[in-house]
Amino acid sequence: MTDRQWETLLRVINGEQLNPLPAAFIIDSPWLPGWYGCSTLDYFSSDEVWLAANRKAVESFPDIMFLPGFWAEYGMCTEPSAFGARCSWSEKNLPHAEKILADVDALANIRDLLHKPDPRVDGLLPFILNRLRRSEAALQEMGHAHRFAVARGPLNIASFLMGTTDFLMGLRLYPAESHYLLEVVTDFLIDWTGLQLETFPTMDGILLLDDIVGFIGPEDCAEFMMPYFKRIYGEFDVSVKFLHNDAEGRVCAPLLPEIGVNLFNFSFLHSFKEMKELTGNKVALLGQIPPRDVLAAGSPEEVAAAVKASLSGLDDTTRIIPSCGGGMPQDVPTDNLRAFATALA
């Protein structure tokens, strides 16, 4: 992100009224390789291809903020790889991380099976740091900088280590052991986030991505989500504390101000008005048109209409950043992004 874009983001978070409203999207490996015209494998394995794809995005859409911006990642393999997950790679599709715990009953022995990784040396994390280091000079020449320390959230990582169904069952069958699992993952995430912030002084934000938050009910959210996210966000004095959850968001939304979140990317199933009410208008909201069925599959006219519909009836448009209800999906065409930006002009 450029200095100007970062300042715009902070103004929105601080509750200033902006006119026109800024557009922003989370972009990473599902969208960039296909849009740029390279294979997924080339995008992940080549610093040059990764940098060129991200450069093309920011130069093609100078009026759109891309978050976190020049994101170095290996899909859902990023953090599980540090725990020893086997990662499978494909020329065109996203990679997959195999679970490391056989089933829900493995939680009974979790203290022997799970140990905190070292993000400086384990898994794919050193490669991510090195890619970010190698790109710093090029970003500076473009007027951009690394702004966010990024990681999947503790529930998301735990679900990859166990499998989603077994993890959710474990919350009921092995609550104490599930807490231990989440404590180890949270300790690791504090180390990994802190390492990124320490390595890159331009970073002044944290982005956690965790859709599993939307799979649990109010009691479980208060017990198994809130304390761990609160620890991570509370550990660091940064200006932007960003959460992505494009599954069910109504359960976690009222907890976000106490957790420390000040920017929330939420599902297209919810409206800006509803999220404003649930967060007490204390959290900036990034959303909210359907990513796949409208932004990717719709016509430019349908995209523009959806953008305007998402904002209609809002008496207060502070702390609003129009986007889609989730990360940028595959196959979003250039014309649809331009139509989105034009609809806000």
Image: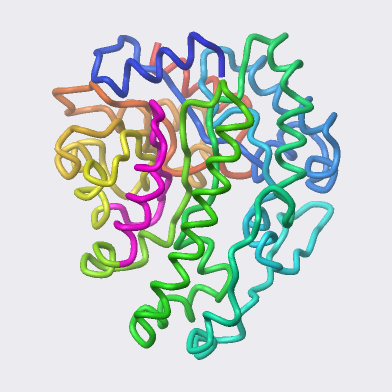
Q: Position of residue 220 (x, y in %)?
A: 27, 69
**As drawn, 12 above or below 74:** above
Q: Residue at x 22, y 50 (%)?
A: 255
Q: Which residues are magenta?
A: 224-249
Q: Residue at x 75, y 24 (%)?
A: 135
Q: Which corner quadrant of the image does residue 274 belong to?
A: top left
**As drawn, 89 above or below 309:** below
Which image quarter holds the N terminus? top right
Residue in front for this viewpoint, 90 or 69: 69
Q: Position of residue 227 (x, y in %)?
A: 31, 58
Residue 44 left/right relative to 292:
right
Q: Position of residue 167 (x, y in %)?
A: 46, 76
**As drawn, 265 above or below 237:** below
Q: Residue at x 47, y 54 (%)?
A: 153
Asked whether residue 231 is drawn in magenta, I would say yes
Q: Position of residue 96 (x, y in %)?
A: 70, 63
Residue 33 left/right relative to 325:
right
Residue in front for this viewpoint, 188 or 212: 188
